């Protein structure tokens, strides 16, 4: 499986949206392959979501497990700048993904994940020459719109 195509970092609102899309496209890749290099490169050290993915993927693959790759559609809906920090943007993104499964190392058990459609809020920060992901939250129904 090939990693998602890299993006060209741009310090623009559209650049933040492109980086967020790239980051979200890494999600099925890291679960399927266990290759966390690109994920770790774009993730802030203090990003709780990012770190939980690193822990979960490492645990799964260290035990000999794996996940099926899955298709997903990512559509940035809007973005806004943090009033307190002009280097920080939040990208509101719709993510639709298909059903998929992950498997234990012994092959005896699997976990099924149903198809879903979610709105994610991805907080991005421009640091010198690239974007880093600081926070990822699921937008709760009624949060916006």
Image: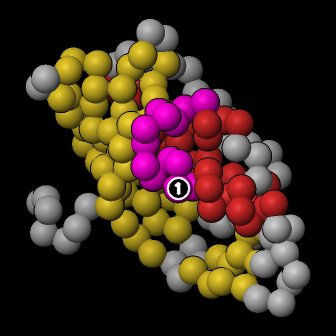
Quadrant of residue 66 within the rendered picture: bottom right
Q: Nearer the viewer, residue 102 or 76?
A: 102
Pointer 1: what residue? 52
Q: Residue furthest top?
A: 128
Q: Decide whether the magenta segment is chiefly helix, strand or loop.
A: helix
| Residue 28 seen by the camera | no
Q: Residue 27: where, in percent of width, then height?
A: 59, 53
Q: Residue at x 49, y 34 (%)?
A: 45
Q: Residue at x 45, y 75 (%)?
A: 116
Crowding at mark 1 (Cα within 10 Å: few <14, some 14-19, many 20+)? few
Quadrant of residue 15 within the rendered picture: top left
Quadrant of residue 5 within the rendered picture: top right
User: Is 24 located above or below residue 40 in the figure?
Assistant: below
Give the magenta part as a residue range.
Answer: 41-53
Residue 128 shown left or right of residue 93 in the figure? right
Q: Is residue 52 magenta?
A: yes
Q: Is residue 137 magenta?
A: no
Question: In terms of secondary structure, where does tag 1 sit?
Answer: helix
Q: Residue 8: where, in percent of width, then height?
A: 56, 20
């Amino acid at each position: 499986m090939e990693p998602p195509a890299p993006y060209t970092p741009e310090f623009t609102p559209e650049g933040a949206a492109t980086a967020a899309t790239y980051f979200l496209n890494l999600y099925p890749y890291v679960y399927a392959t266990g290759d966390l290099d690109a994920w770790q490169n774009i993730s802030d050290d203090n990003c709780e979501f990012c770190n939980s993915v690193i822990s979960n993927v490492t645990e799964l693959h260290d035990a000999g497990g794996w996940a099926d790759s899955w298709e997903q559609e990512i559509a940035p809906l809007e973005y806004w700048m943090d009033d307190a920090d002009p280097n920080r943007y939040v990208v509101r993104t719709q993510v639709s993904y298909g059903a998929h499964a992950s498997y234990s190392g012994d092959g005896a058990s699997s976990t099924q994940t149903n198809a879903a459609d979610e709105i994610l809020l991805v907080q991005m920060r421009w640091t010198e020459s690239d974007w880093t992901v600081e926070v990822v939250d699921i937008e709760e129904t009624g949060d916006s719109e």
